[in-house]
Amino acid sequence: MTAVGGRPEVLDLFCCAGGAGVGYARAGFAVTGVDLVDRPRYPHRFVRADALEYLAALIASGEIRRFAFVHSSPPCQAGCALTVGTNASRGWGREHVQLIPALRELLDATGLPYVIEQPDGAAPVRKDLRLCGEMFGLGVLRHRNFEVSGWTFLAPPHVPHRGRVRGYRHGVWHEGPYVAAYGKGGGKATVPEMQAAMGIDWTDVREELTEAIPPAYTEWIGSAFLEVSGLAVAA
């Protein structure tokens, strides 16, 4: 492992616009993001590549050893609740490739500690850690599950929600302390509302915001890992 400016480095696979990466940077990591699509708003070092191919190349070359930790947020359409629930029941959508088994095999081959992040649904990941916005006082719920490998942690308690997500449900309007940071219409959040609710200010692209996880999640994960690994950088 090498350090960048004295900071350990995290590899952020399927990085999208950087919700995860910003959290790790706040925790004390240097961050390298990888995504198949160009992400001009990604606020850290960025590599445009197929994440699985890039990871395999890092392993083959030995360059993977420069990293201390790997975060991965593979596409969730093959197993998310919307795809396997509402969309499937109505005959919507299309076939989606499930990348997680191949990803996990490569991650295990790195020998590094890692997490695989997924939303609620049928994705084949262990739910070792479950985080939601209310744990961090955010304006979204955005539950996310993490399969954790190679390190130990004490999970924070999943605190009770303060109310409903604002918007229409089955034609009935509901007020609530959280906004729906996905889709359009039906009382879904505006772009400024999503930015404020998730603590994201470096992108104003709706599609990137709807896919992002709040940086608070990975700031917690990164800080917990650095503490147990003894890699935390003194302030």
Image (cartoon, rainbow, N blue to C red):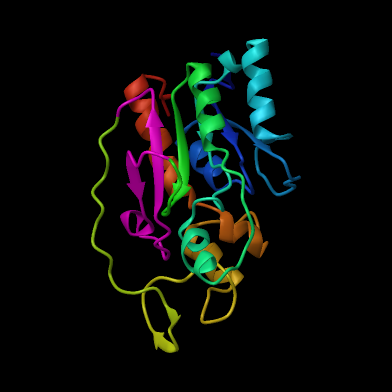
- Viewed as shown, does residue 53 lie left or right of 68? right
Residue 204 visible in the snapshot? no
- Residue 80 x, y percent position in the rendering: 49, 55
Q: Vertically, is 232 above or below 88? A: above
* Image quadrant assignment for residue 15: top right
Q: Residue at x 64, y 21 (%)?
A: 56
Labels in figure, total: 0
Q: Vertically, is 76 above or below 185? A: above
* Image quadrant assignment for residue 6: top right
> Is 147 covered by the magenta stretch?
yes
- Viewed as shown, does residue 177 lie left or right of 188? left
Task: Pick whichever, 90 or 98, lies toward us.
Answer: 90
- Where are the magenta residues, as a range? 125-152
- Residue 225 x, y percent position in the rendering: 38, 29
Quadrant where the C terminus sits is top left
Task: Pick whichever, 96 or 224, lies toward us.
Answer: 96
Q: Residue at x 42, y 46 (%)?
A: 217
Q: Residue at x 55, y 43 (%)?
A: 22
Query: From this viewpoint, which residue is outermost toward the bottom?
Result: 172
Q: Vertically, is 233 above or below 198? A: above
- Residue 234 x, y percent position in the rendering: 41, 24
Residue 229 visible in the snapshot? yes
- Residue 54 x, y percent position in the rendering: 68, 26
Q: Residue at x 38, y 57 (%)?
A: 133
> Is 180 covered by the magenta stretch?
no
Quadrant where the N terminus sits is top right
